[in-house]
């Protein structure tokens, strides 16, 4: 059986000591093993990065960017293969994997702008014969730790930008679907990245803890669940590292009485059930304002959901695939059971989907639950499955209070035709990414991605302008070249321009 190893200093390495099964979630069969890196292996990757750093730091930004231009071409040329790999291990349908990859490529395109992004800020004549400028220097060796749900896109949020900024990078991807991530890193080598600048170590807590404690790692970017994000942030910062740790979510959509209900239903279908709800921006709660909106939403949603197609990734007519593991399937079903036990109404029940030929796959069908209330476990916690819950309230303010009270603040959306209501909502809601009639307001690569509250630990969001700031240290230089013969006396008061 194939073993997915590590890419260290440009070489594929399999340690062979500890490994874990990788499943095909559509069949329930083990397809591969993933090697779990020991502390020693992770330290080799860090050492390779440390050794590569001085030359890479000294490489002009335009030359670093050229590697990214080539990398983009290779990603596009290998898109089908990458999507196939994602489908086999994650289960997402080809069209969805292609969307994920495209979003990742857009981050590479942003990174291609490194010479412009790193130009810095300049002030001539900040004082007599004095010029001042800020430049953005790399940090050194930085690490990324990523989740299973976007094995291509989320790592691409991190390392292209970190690397064009002059850093070296050690990536620890999810051990549940490692193949596409490793293959993509290989493409970056092919694009001409010097050995050691980027290494990939597969592994579990041992690998992560090594990165968090090694003093050569200057910064850590993490994306995953909130309990782990909190652990990563507190450990990394306690060890003196810069850290951004993006966590879980519970994204609400407010459905106003004046919303175009057919459009709203179409948007909600994709945002709630696409990728089996395994997106940190999935809309998992619809808050209907007024019973008329609630009744219309439930009726139209129920009708539309009869057409949902769940199945294997190779059939592009499927809307979404299985969830990632048997354990996760049980967890999602457990949340549906708990909602029912706590008094909610299961309107469309996806607990026993029939997927012909894939009876052992980890499928959960699209599920619609009405009359959900804030005390329910299924409301409080992130389900991360194809489940849309409907909460009914009387006013928009009540809907906003509900969203603000939730521990997560990743994404949210309002469906309305009322510009004033939308403006009030986007201005006041305590959530980091807001959509107005846009259900998945995932920022484009030249903005930045980050939630509020317990969806993000740290002060800088991922990628885009915040990413540049995260992966660089500002240095401000003040320079004076006095004219020949001019000597200035000692100055004991604080220098000013007065
Ligand atoms: P996870 O937290 O289980 O794993 C993420 C990473 O942390 C993996 O690389 C994993 O190996 C590592 N890890 C897991 N347990 C660890 C431990 N005890 N100690 C050290 N490292 C550990 O997350 P997941 O299940 O892979 O991904 C799903 C979660 O990620 C969801 O909560 C989802 O909302 C979140 N997510 C958030 C964003 C965002 O941008 N906010 C994006 C994608 C996914």
Image (spheres, helix red, strand yellow):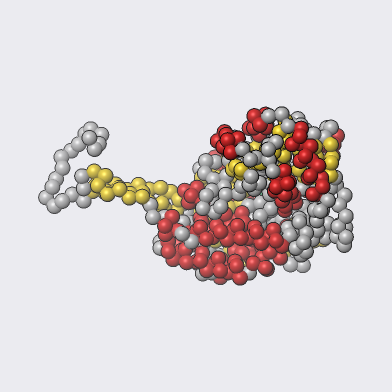
Relative vertical location of residue 247 with respect to residue 96 in this rendering, above or below: above
Image coordinates of residue 279 in percent, x first then y, are: 68, 49
Q: Is residue 66 left or right of residue 294?
A: left
For the point 64% across and 44% down, the residue is 437
User: Which quadrant is home to the N terminus?
Assistant: bottom right
Residue nearest the viewer, comparing 50 with 129: 129
User: Which quadrant is home to the C terminus?
Assistant: top left
Q: From this viewpoint, is residue 421 visible? A: yes
For the point 30% across and 48% down, the residue is 123
For the point 76% across and 64% down, the residue is 314
For the point 79% across and 61% down, the residue is 312
Instruction: Choose top left, top right, bottom left or bottom right for residue 457.
Output: top right
Q: From this viewpoint, is residue 6 visible? A: no
Query: Which residue is at the far left?
Result: 485
Instruction: Choose top left, top right, bottom left or bottom right for residue 172.
Output: bottom right
Image coordinates of residue 221 in percent, x first then y, are: 56, 49
Residue nearest the viewer, comparing 36 with 360: 360
Q: Is residue 373 left or right of residue 459?
A: right
Instruction: Choose top left, top right, bottom left or bottom right for residue 173.
Output: bottom right
Image coordinates of residue 30 in percent, x first then y, are: 80, 61
Total tally of numbered discs in the picture = 0
Relative vertical location of residue 257 with respect to residue 32 in this rendering, above or below: above
Image coordinates of residue 442 in percent, x first then y, are: 60, 49
């Amino acid at each position: 059986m194939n073993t997915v190893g590590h890419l260290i200093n440009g070489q594929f390495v399999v340690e062979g000591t500890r490994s874990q099964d990788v499943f095909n979630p559509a069949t329930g069969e083990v397809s591969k093993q993933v090697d779990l890196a020991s502390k020693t292996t992770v330290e080799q990757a860090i050492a390779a990065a440390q050794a590569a750093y001085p030359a890479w730091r000294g490489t002009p930004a335009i030359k670093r960017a050229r590697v990214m231009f080539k990398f983009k071409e290779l990603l596009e040329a290998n898109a089908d293969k990458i999507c196939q790999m994602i489908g086999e291990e994650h289960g997402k349908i080809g069209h969805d994997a292609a969307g994920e990859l495209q979003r990742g490529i857009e981050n590479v395109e942003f990174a291609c702008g490194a010479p412009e992004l790193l130009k810095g800020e300049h002030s001539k004549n900040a004082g007599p014969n004095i010029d001042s400028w800020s430049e953005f220097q790399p940090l050194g060796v930085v690490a990324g730790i990523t989740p299973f749900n976007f094995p291509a896109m989320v790592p691409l949020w991190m390392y292209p930008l970190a690397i064009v900024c002059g850093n070296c990078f050690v990536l620890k991807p999810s051990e549940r679907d490692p193949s596409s991530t490793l293959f993509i890193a290989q493409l970056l080598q092919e694009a001409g990245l010097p050995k050691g600048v980027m290494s990939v170590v597969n592994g579990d807590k041992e690998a992560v803890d090594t990165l968090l404690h090694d003093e050569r790692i200057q910064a850590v970017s993490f994306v995953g669940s909130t309990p782990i994000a909190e652990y990563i942030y507190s450990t990394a910062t306690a060890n003196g590292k810069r850290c951004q740790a993006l966590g879980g979510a519970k994204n609400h959509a407010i459905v106003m009485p004046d919303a175009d209900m057919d459009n709203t239903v179409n948007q909600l279908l994709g945002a709630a059930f696409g990728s089996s709800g395994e997106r940190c921006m999935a809309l998992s709660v619809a808050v209907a304002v007024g019973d008329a909106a609630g009744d219309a939403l439930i009726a139209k949603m129920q009708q539309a959901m009869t057409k949902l197609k769940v199945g294997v990734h190779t059939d592009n007519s499927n809307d979404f695939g299985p969830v990632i593991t048997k354990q996760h399937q049980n967890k999602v079903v457990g949340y549906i059971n708990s909602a029912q036990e706590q008094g909610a109404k299961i309107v469309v029940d996806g607990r026993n989907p029939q997927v012909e030929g894939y009876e052992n796959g980890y499928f959960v069908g699209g599920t619609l639950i009405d009359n959900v209330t804030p005390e329910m476990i299924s409301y409080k916690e992130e389900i991360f499955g194809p489940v849309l819950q409907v909460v009914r309230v009387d006013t928009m303010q009540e809907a906003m209070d509900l969203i603000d009270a939730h521990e997560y603040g990743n994404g949210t959306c309002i469906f309305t035709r009322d510009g004033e209501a939308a403006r009030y909502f986007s201005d006041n809601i305590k959530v980091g990414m807001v959509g107005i009639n846009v259900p998945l307001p995932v920022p484009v690569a030249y903005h930045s991605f980050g939630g509020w509250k317990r969806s993000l630990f740290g002060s800088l969001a991922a990628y885009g302008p915040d990413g540049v700031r995260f992966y660089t240290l500002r240095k401000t230089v003040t320079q004076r070249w006095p004219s020949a013969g001019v000597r200035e006396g000692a100055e004991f008061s604080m220098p000013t321009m007065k």
